[in-house]
Image (cartoon, grey):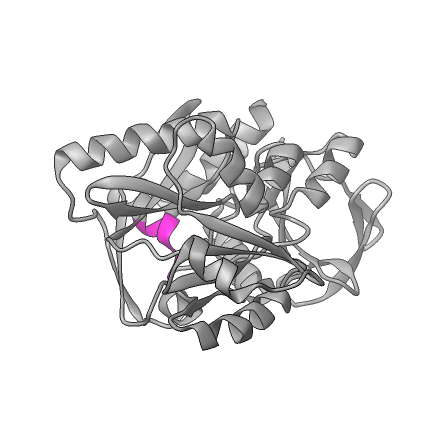
Amino acid sequence: MKKNIAIIMGGYSSEVDISLKSGEVVYQNISKELYNTYKVHILKDKWVLVNDDNIEFVINKHDFSAKIDGQKINFDCVFNAIHGHPGEDGTILAYFDLIGLKHTSAPFYEMAVTFNKRDTLSIVKQYGIKTATSYYLDKGETIYIEKIIKKVGLPCFVKPNNAGSSFGISKAKTKEDIIPAIEKAFKEDSQILIEEFLDGPEITIGVINYNNEIKVLPMTEIVTDNDFFDYEAKYLGKSQEITPARISDEIHQKLERIAKKVYKILNLSGFSRAEYILVNDEPYFLEINMVPGLTNASLIPQQAAEAGISLQELFHNAIKMALKN
């Protein structure tokens, strides 16, 4: 009997539109011969199953089921394609755990930790992973510009603590840029971090649980036309994404070891995509995304293709691992 798979997409954050695109790609690339697939939009004002005719059926939040033409649909597994809250921060995954519904992401606690950039950095630092010098600021705290500059220098990056797709991030080049950058970041989150600028190539690394093994996908080098890998660079073609990255075998092996180590340290499963900067051939960890983009323009699909893994194989593996675990 075919399993019923709910592909959840949307969410409550600024990434809602990107998530809907990711979810649609997942839906189109899962075999309908092997699985019964359903698109489920998780939005602030409604949770609905949406069929191919765009007819909506309300999700019963008691057991995450739906009724279609009088027939109740229960799900065997949820494919999580929600970027940001409540999918990537673990909120909805805790709910699934409570009702006993399996999903394709890491456990909710690990998702919550990795969504919080400060917490993630504090953990990996303890294991010798190099990171940028950072300064933390909460909304309402006094802003000491000179203190910030003394600690992280200029230029520096100002980013929300809990956000993705580069929403709310700015590169402050001068003292005068810092306040506007802070205000922009606070529009996305009540906690922000300000990091030193690391000068070097940016390498993005996908790590997944593939056939019960931790697999590091071919790495991508980011060469952006903008000041950094911002929203335009990620989604509007303002960057080159070179896969595999133009790095030596020695650097590749070093990055692979570190990427696997971070995945294990954080007790992860499912999809992940982490960002590193190479400074004098030394990798510095920036952050990790646990529901990375799955659109045609996204990095994980590019890296999987380079590894000889089709989108269907990638998504089927995620479902198999979820159902098994």
- Residue 77 or residue 93, whichever sits in front: 93
The quadrant in which the N terminus is found is top right
Name the dominant secondary structure of the magenta segment: helix
Specify the quadrant of the image occupied by residue 228.
bottom left
Percent position of residue 196, x then y:
39, 55
Q: Is residue 203 visible?
A: yes
- Image mark count: 0
* Above or below: residue 209 compared with residue 6: above
Residue 217 shown left or right of residue 152 in the figure: left
**Which residue range is magenta in the image?**
297-302
* Identity of the residue drawn at 53% across and 63% down: 18
Q: Picture quarter containing residue 35?
A: top right
Left or right for 37, reference 205? right
Taking the image as drawn, is residue 307 in sight? no
- Residue under the point 62% across and 63% down: 52
From the top left corner, tell me how far across and down residue 36 is, in percent.
61, 43
Q: Residue at x 29, y 40 (%)?
A: 283
Q: Is residue 300 magenta?
A: yes
> Measured along the vertical axis of the image, is residue 32 above or below residue 196?
above
Q: Quadrant of residue 100?
A: top right
Across and down, in percent, residue 240 comes to: 25, 63
